[in-house]
Image (cartoon, rainbow, N blue to C red):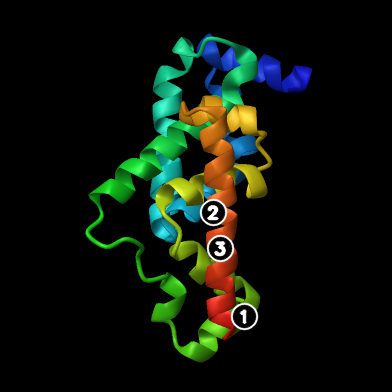
Amino acid sequence: MDEELRRFVHAARTGSKEAFAELVRRFKGNVYRHAYGMLGSRSEAEDAAQEAFIKAYYSISRLDADFAFSSWMMRIVTNICLDRLKKRTDEWPVAEESRLSAAAARDEMSDTRMAIQEAMRQLSPEHRQVLLLHDMQGYRYEEISELLDIPLGTVKSRLNAARLALRKEWKKGEA
């Protein structure tokens, strides 16, 4: 973490609203992308990201170390997403794009992106989250282990299983 970011986190921990606003500005993209990857719905991802920042705002004074903000924030959004997934009656919502006409959906998303999204829908939440954290957000195995509070070996096996399942779903989509 760069020194400037550490200062923002420290200031936010001591009550600076401006510093927290800067943290939101810097992390909102990552938080939203992670929520969208977990939930598969833009509106639900926006709600989850907003809820995550609200929770972070009210509990940042309890953050143990300034350098842990990124991992802590991702843990908050991951937990919110997992809670939302547990409450769902269906496993994955119908993507908003599929509600549009087929022509409009093709204009909005490339075929490849649609295929990836469809393949991701088939993954379990546990596999989806490690895949998102490692391959899309760039977290190391050790960070994911700490973030999700699971053993390092479990992170590696879930990531391997997620990649295999994603490949299998991708191939089914190509056939």
Compared with residue 158, is residue 26 higher up or lower down, i.e. above or below? above
- Residue 60, how many percent across, how many down? 47, 18
Q: Label 2 amino acid?
A: Ala
Crowding near the residue tagged with mark 1, few <14, some 14–19, many ≥20 C-alpha atoms within 10 Å: few
Residue that badge 3 annotates: 166
Q: Label 1 amino acid?
A: Asp
Q: Nearer the viewer, mark 1 or mark 2?
A: 2
Tell whether label 3 touches label 2 (CB within 8 Å): yes
Q: Earlier in the sequence, mark 1 or mark 2?
A: 1
Compared with residue 15, is residue 100 higher up or lower down, i.e. above or below? below
Residue 130: quarter of image: top right
> Helix, strand or loop at disc 1?
helix
Q: Residue at x 55, y 69 (%)?
A: 168
Residue that badge 1 annotates: 111
> Helix, strand or loop at disc 3?
helix
Q: Label 3 amino acid?
A: Leu
In the figure, is residue 145 to the left or right of 89?
right
Q: Residue at x 75, y 20 (%)?
A: 4
Q: Is residue 171 visible?
A: yes
- Measured in 3D between alpha carbons, the distance from the residue under mark 1 to the one under mark 3, in whole angstroms, is 16 Å
Compared with residue 49, is residue 21 higher up or lower down, i.e. above or below? above
Residue that badge 2 annotates: 162
Crowding near the residue tagged with mark 3, few <14, some 14–19, many ≥20 C-alpha atoms within 10 Å: many
- Residue 68, how many percent across, how many down? 60, 19
Q: Earlier in the sequence, mark 1 or mark 3?
A: 1
